[in-house]
Amino acid sequence: MTQYDRQAIAALATLILLQLIMLSALYSGIRPHPPVATPLFGIAPFLGASMSIALAAIIVQPLTTATGRVLGVLAALMALVSFGPQKYFDAQFALIWPAVILGQVSALVIILRVGQAVSRGDERTHVAPSCAGQA
């Protein structure tokens, strides 16, 4: 695993934890927490889907395969719904700025590392070492 792989996985794990903490705040009623509902969807199901996609990207390796890259970028974009630049205009920004900034940095790391992997043409396959001859 390269340093770029580690950075992308760390950024995805960061997004998962940030969203899990915000979802926990919503369920427990601790402020600040995300709104219970937004005009287009329910926030809890959206956060659940976003975290699931980020975890799937980690499992299939976010820089190694096309599937991992798509999932990684999708996870980053979905996280930006909660942590994107629009949050600078949120009335609670003074309370949520650490999560917003960390979420944006994490999303940026994922998108940059995936972009670099695509430009390099990385398509690595992980092959398990042969067990032949081992008892």
Image (cartoon, grey):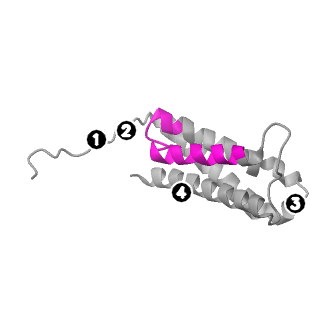
Per the rendered image, the range of residues in magenta is: 45-69
- 4 or 2: tag closer to the N-terminus: 4
> Is-magenta flag for residue 86?
no
Camera-side mark, 2 or 3: 3
Identify the residue shown where x is 41% and y is 52%: 2
Q: Give the residue type that dot 4 points to.
A: Ala
Q: Are marks 1 and 2 in contact (CB under 8 Å)?
A: no
Q: Is residue 1 left or right of residue 6?
A: left
Q: Are marks 3 and 1 in contact (CB under 8 Å)?
A: no
- 1 or 4: tag closer to the N-terminus: 4
User: Which residue is label 4 attached to?
Assistant: 10
Camera-side mark, 4 or 3: 3
**Where residue 43 appears, x then y in whole percent?**
76, 47
- 47 up-or-down from 70: above or below: below
Label 4 sits on a secondary structure element that is: helix
- The crowding category of the residue bearing disc 4, from other C-alpha atoms within 10 Å (few below 14, some 14 to 19, many at least 20), is some
User: Which residue is label 2 attached to?
Assistant: 124
C-alpha gap between disc 4 and disc 3? 27 Å
Say if residue 115 shows up in the picture.
no
**Where residue 88 appears, x then y in whole percent?**
84, 54
Q: Is residue 80 left or right of residue 113?
A: right
Q: Give the residue type that dot 3 points to.
A: Gln
User: Which residue is label 1 attached to?
Assistant: 127
C-alpha gap between disc 1 and disc 4? 23 Å
Q: Is residue 130 left or right of residue 58?
A: left
User: Which residue is label 3 attached to?
Assistant: 92
Residue 49: which numbered mark, if any?
Answer: none
User: Residue 34 lies in what quarter of the image?
Assistant: bottom right
- 84 up-or-down from 30: above or below: above
